[in-house]
Image: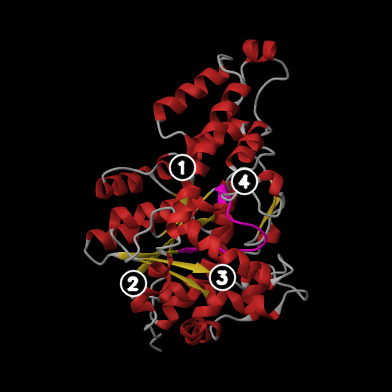
Amino acid sequence: MNSESMSSFRVTPWEVEGVVDYKKLLEDFGAYEITGELLSTIKEIAGELHLLLSRRIFYAHRDLDLVLKDYIEGKRFFLYTGIAPSKSTMHLGHITPFILTQWLQEKFKVNAYIMIPDEEKYLAKKTESLRRVDELVNRTILDIIALGFDSDRTFIFKDREYIKHLYTAAVVVARRINWSLVKAVFGFNGETSIGLIFYPALQIVPTLFEKKRCLIPYGIDQDPYFRVQRDVAPKIGYYKTAGIMSKFIPGLEGIDSKMSASKPETAIFLSDDPKVAAKKVMNAFTGGQPTVKEQREKGGNPDICCVFQWFKILFEPSNEALEERYRKCINGEILCGECKIELAQRVEEFLICHQRKVRDAERLKDKFLYDGKLAQRMWNWEFKY
């Protein structure tokens, strides 16, 4: 379904406009909420549930049940995700799919393929300079490595460097995708770059790296690519890809805003000076009352507070502490300034730790791109057609 047909909001792989109705989005995209039964199965296999799952930040799926069934039957699966550099380094909203992907890799002991499409945002006219994209690629790769991926089970590749290995499969895929389909799914029009029109075929290729089912953690705005994959894959003898989809991470402007690299004021970037990031948090939108007196009397509204949501998504590992924070907020026992100060401290600590890991990642980079077990295998990979 063309995302532009949604009346109150618009979701494409490049833009999100309006207040997103996540249930309606599932109806339009033909996906399903993750059930308690699926979460129980994951917990039984992994021994625990990641907070991004238990707190329903990743809330929807396609064929997750089949992925788990395959795993239980010994067929296993593989992981795929990626990010397209454009105008800035990664921000906190970008890393949630990578955090879950790393956790799934660790718990299920499976391969992970990470695409760095160093052409997509340029073709989509979201950045003016291909040179700027190139400048960001190295830092993007280091940010990903710093999250703890297994260097022998992870292959990170840049499209323009790896294109010789991608192109044959992309041609086979592209033959089975017509203009009418991509126009309907992506909303392409007469102003769309011809390179971007071909790009969906390229993004589908990593789902064909193994003759197993592929599981992709991603923000739900990326779903159009993988709906097309599910149409094409059976025609060329491969599995339909499975997906596990997240809600958008709210920006500093409020719960209905999206953290966006194109709006730096809405985001905490992984390259931000930790002190600067802490100051950004202190300016974040909350669900508090106009005055301290009213806050004490009426309480706040954590459901519309992006500060509370950031605790929920990334910065409060304890369910008991999160529930207590919620209770204190609605009862007026805690003020917005107190929550902001605590979140600012945690963001600052996270960035200090992450940036140290980024510096350490420099010496590991070649294992992920070229020298690790999976990387070496993939530089010899050829698509069989």
Q: Hey, which residue is sitting farthest bottom in the picture?
A: 385
Check disc 1: other Cα within 10 Å, few if <14, some if 14-19, many if 20+: some
Query: Marks 1 and 4, Cα distance to the nearest angstrom?
Result: 15 Å
60 in relation to 127, above or below? above
Q: Nearer the viewer, residue 224 or 79?
A: 79
- Mark-to-mark CA distance, 1 and 3: 28 Å
In this figure, which residue is indicated by the disc labeled 1? 56
Residue 331 versus residue 2 in the image, above or below: above
Tell me the SS state at disc 4: loop
As for residue 92 lying within the magenta part, the answer is yes
| Front position in the image: 269 or 171 | 269
Q: Which mark is residue 117?
A: 3
Q: Please, what is the three-letter code of the amino acid marked with disc 1?
A: Arg
Q: CA distance from mark 2 to mark 4?
A: 39 Å
The answer to whether any part of residue 43 appears in the image is: yes
Circle 2 residue: 374
**In the image: residue 72, left or right of residue 119:** left
Residue 251 appears left or right of 148 = right
**Which residue is at a point 73% across and 19% down the rendered structure image?**
290
The answer to which image quadrant residue 198 occupies is bottom right
Using a 10 Å C-alpha cutoff, classify the residue at mark 4 as few (fewer than 14 neighbours), some (14 to 19) or many (20 or more).
few
Residue type at numbered disc 4: Asp
Q: Which mark is residue 21?
A: 4
